[in-house]
Image (cartoon, grey):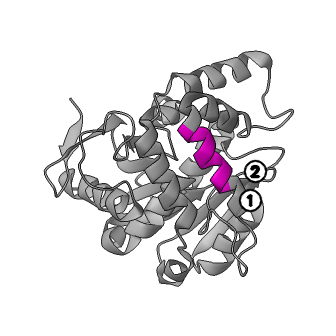
């Protein structure tokens, strides 16, 4: 079974498919490795695709430490060490992108490329960073999760896509069914992860990123604003940015073929001759 043990001796889950350059995928808040279905299926012909379940999420629930970015980042680092991965192309989505930023200093020697998808250094807006959600929105999310986590997440899923984003109704139904099939963390874990997400500020980490970076975002993202992705691109010296038109915060789902193609092209540029 695809488990590994972190530095605390706790068991965490990962999915794996394919061989070659390691492509490590880190999911977002209240999701799991299952959300990367279209990457695990399609990219295994080009990569050794590895998708982690962050602590408290998916099958990684046997943990005693807090669900904060320090813990998430340590677990990601331990995965790379446990599997002895080098030349990694790391992909983090939303909260997973912040996990990648938090872990970067510890894992940078193992990376060939870093991709941040629908990312932000600050989930919540501040006076000097207006490109996040208003504090009352984060507070409202806490209240909804406390009342009924499943119903709150249904509303969260609805905000992930914009009108006209899906190619057809069949594609929409498949993606929404996939999201509905992902078992969220329990309520306390969901709230703990949300608190970490809402209070994190990772702007100070950006100048230290020297690995080639790709910023991917939808132009109509209502959760992690497009201006936040531009901020990342402007403040990571090695970064290039690509924008998906008429797309929300999950281009790897609604624009899977184009997303996968961009990952392959980026990996070819940072791992020449190996993809």
Location of residue 226 in the rendering, given as x and y in whole percent from the top left corner: 76, 60
Which disc, if any, is residue 221?
A: 2
Location of residue 86 in the rendering, given as x and y in whole percent from the top left corner: 29, 60
Location of residue 189 in the rendering, given as x and y in whole percent from the top left corner: 41, 44
Pick the residue in front: 177 or 144: 144
Examine the image and state in which quarter residue 132 appears. Answer: bottom right
Drawn side of residue 130 relative to residue 214, left or right: right
Q: Is residue 45 above or below residue 191?
A: above
Highlighted range, magenta: 138-146
Q: Residue furthest top?
A: 170
Q: Residue at x 80, y 53 (%)?
A: 219
Q: Is residue 142 visible?
A: yes
Residue assigned mark 1: 225
Which disc, if any, is residue 113?
A: none
Q: Label 2's element?
A: loop
| Main SS category, magenta section | helix
Q: Residue at x 46, y 31 (%)?
A: 34
Q: Residue furthest left?
A: 9
Residue 188 on the magenta span: no
């Amino acid at each position: 079974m695809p488990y590994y043990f972190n530095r605390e001796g706790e068991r965490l889950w990962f999915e794996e498919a394919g061989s070659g350059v390691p492509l490590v995928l880190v999911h977002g808040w209240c999701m799991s490795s299952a959300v990367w279905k279209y990457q695990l299926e399609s990219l295994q012909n080009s990569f050794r695709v590895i998708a982690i379940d962050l602590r408290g999420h998916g099958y990684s629930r046997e943990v005693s430490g807090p669900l904060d970015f320090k813990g998430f980042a340590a677990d990601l680092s331990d995965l790379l060490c446990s599997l002895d991965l080098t030349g990694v192309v790391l992909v983090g989505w939303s909260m997973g992108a912040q996990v990648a930023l938090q872990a970067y200093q510890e894992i940078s020697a193992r990376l060939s490329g870093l991709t941040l998808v629908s990312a932000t250094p600050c989930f919540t807006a501040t006076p000097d960073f207006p490109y996040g959600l208003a504090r009352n929105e984060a507070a409202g999310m806490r209240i909804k999760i406390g009342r009924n986590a499943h119903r709150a997440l249904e509303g969260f899923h609805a905000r992930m896509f914009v009108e006209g984003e899906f190619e057809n109704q069949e594609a929409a139904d498949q993606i929404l069914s996939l999201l509905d099939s992902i078992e969220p963390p329990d309520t306390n874990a969901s709230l703990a992860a949300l608190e970490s997400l809402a209070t994190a500020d990772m702007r100070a980490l950006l100048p230290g990123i020297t690995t080639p970076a790709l910023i991917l975002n939808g132009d109509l993202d209502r959760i992690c604003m497009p201006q936040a992705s531009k901020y990342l691109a402007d403040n990571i010296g090695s970064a290039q940015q690509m924008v998906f038109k008429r797309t929300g915060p999950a281009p790897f789902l609604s624009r899977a073929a184009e997303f996968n193609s961009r990952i392959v092209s980026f990996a070819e540029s940072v791992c020449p001759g190996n993809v």
